[in-house]
Every structure is written in structure tokens, then in C-alpha cells.
Image (tube, rainbow, N blue to C red):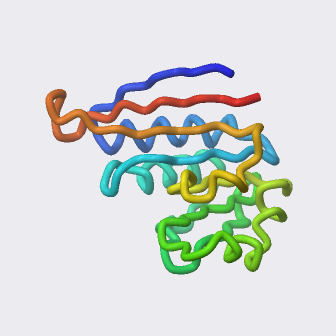
Amino acid sequence: MSTVIYETNSPEETHALGKQIGEAAKAGELYTLTGDLGVGKTVFTQGVAEGLGIEEPINSPTFTIVQVYEEGRLPFYHFDVYRIGDIDEMDEIGYEDYFYGDGVSIVEWAELIEELLPQERTDIIIEKDLEKGFDYRRITVISHE
């Protein structure tokens, strides 16, 4: 396990870090994204998508659970499980095909489905610290290999 901490001071820097991760992402990788509402999870995810070569707009799939993007260099599966009522909903959408497939998955609010997550994954925690400024973010990347 390895941990790296990044600090960003604007949405653009958070987006750029996501893009860097997207450019380095490999088939079959899963990233969890944890952080309070409004912390920048979607901005980060938009950066990852750009790093994968996806040009269409990326919005949080709050009501559909998963949004699939196929036009990048790898398929991209963006999950938002915030509104999931029951873990069985993940089975209904066939989450294993995404998590263990040939694309890159990002799961927002992943702590709500902890028991379904593969051990090999990268956890990304985004935190605010208002003492360091309104746009400051501390982004912790923990790789479980």
C-alpha cells in the first residue's frame, strides 16, 4: 500500500490532478472517491475523463448510479452510489462487469458499498480546509495493490 498527498488551490488544479491520473490509468483499475458534498469529486472525475480522452460532458450519475463513456482510450464507468437504497441495486446493474472489466471505474460515495469493492483499488479522499482558503483541497491517494 502506498499513500501520496496532493494539495490543490483551485478547481482547475483539482481537475488537472484528475487528468494526470486519467492519463496514467490502466484497464481494470478502480478508483473510489470520498469527500463531502461540494468538495470537488465531479471536477476531479471530469479531469480523469479528460485524461482518458473523453470529450463529452461528465455529470454525476446521481439518479442512474452508473454512466458509461466509451469514446476514450479505455471505457470509463462513473458510479455515484449516494442514493443507493439497497446494496442489491448494484447486482441489478451488473457492477461486477464494470469493476472487473476492461475499463476504468470511479465510484463516488464508495464507502456506502464497501463490501463490494475489490481489494486492489485506489482510494482518493478529497478534503477541504477553510483555514487554508475556500478553494484549497487536500487529496489523499491510497493505492492498494
In the rendered view, tell whether residue 140 sits above or below residue 81.
Answer: above
Left/right of residue 113 with respect to residue 7 in the rendered view: right
Q: How many marks?
A: 0
Q: x%, y% of residue 8?
A: 34, 31
Residue at the (55%, 67%) spot, across then down: 56
- Percent across and percent down for residue 107 are 59, 55
Counting from the top left corner in percent of width and height, residue 49 is at: 58, 53
Query: Which residue sits at x=62%, y=43%?
Result: 22
In-image side of 48 versus 59 (left or right) = right
**Along the line of sight, the residue nearer the viewer: 124 or 48:** 124
Height in image: 37 above or below 1? below
Q: Quadrant location of the N terminus?
A: top right
On-image quarter of the C terminus = top right
Foreground residue among 6 and 128? 128
Residue drawn where x is 66% and y is 69% of the image:
87
Q: Position of residue 42 (x, y in %)?
A: 44, 56
Q: Say whether residue 57 is left or right of residue 11.
A: right
Answer with left or right where residue 66 lies relative to residue 38: right
Residue 43 or 98: which is nearer the viewer?
Answer: 98
**Going 47% across and 38% down the picture, which residue do you hit?**
125
From this view, report whether residue 5 is shown above or below residue 60: above
In depth, the one of 111 and 28 nearer the eye is 111
